[in-house]
Amino acid sequence: MTRFIAATATALALGLSTPAFAQDDEAKDGLSLMEEGARMLFEGLAQEMAPAMQDLRDLARDLEPGMRAFVAEMGPALADILGQIEDISNYHPPEILPNGDIIIRKKTPAEMAIPNEDEEIEI
């Protein structure tokens, strides 16, 4: 524990004391070279991503009326289904059968039981 505290104190002391040449650069420009490089990197990324972000805004604008209609029509039905399910953790993941049917099996009471703390959990 004392090694950890000593190492942390040393790292903080070294991190807080900036070399003289770094202080001179900061005094001249107001930003260190690292800060300036990070700023330029993020500006470049923003310029590269601007067209994609505009396309995403346009897509969201085009999809908004359809999504609002879907929520207005399906919202009450989905709320009713969720009310009947109670707790989704009581069910197995959906299975797709070879004929295309989708089944969702409810877990047995033994499967829903909370594991004992003494038992190992496989991760």
Image (cartoon, rainbow, N blue to C red):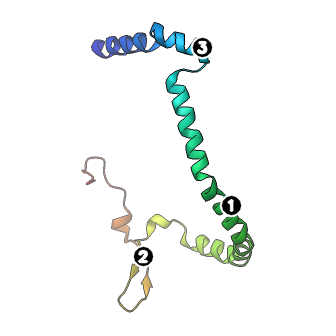
Considering the numbered disc 3 on the image, is that residue within a helix, a strand or a loop? helix
> What label does residue 68 carry, if any?
none
> Callout 2, which amino acid?
Pro
Query: Where residue 57 is drawn, which disc sits there?
Result: 1
- Reading the image, the residue beneath label 3 is 28
**From this viewpoint, is residue 17 visible?**
no
Where's residue 33, x and y in %?
A: 51, 23
Report the residue at 34% width, 13% height from top.
5
Distance (Cα) linking label 2 and label 3:
63 Å
Image quadrant occupied by the N terminus: top left
In this picture, is 94 found above or below 53? below
Q: Residue at x 66, y 78 (%)?
A: 77
- Say whether disc 2 or disc 3 marks the residue closer to the N-terminus: 3
Q: Residues within 10 Å of mark 3 (few under 14, many from 20)?
A: few
Circle 1 crowding by C-alpha within 10 Å: few under 14, some 14–19, many from 20: few
User: Which residue is at the far top?
Assistant: 20
Mark number displayed over residue 94: 2
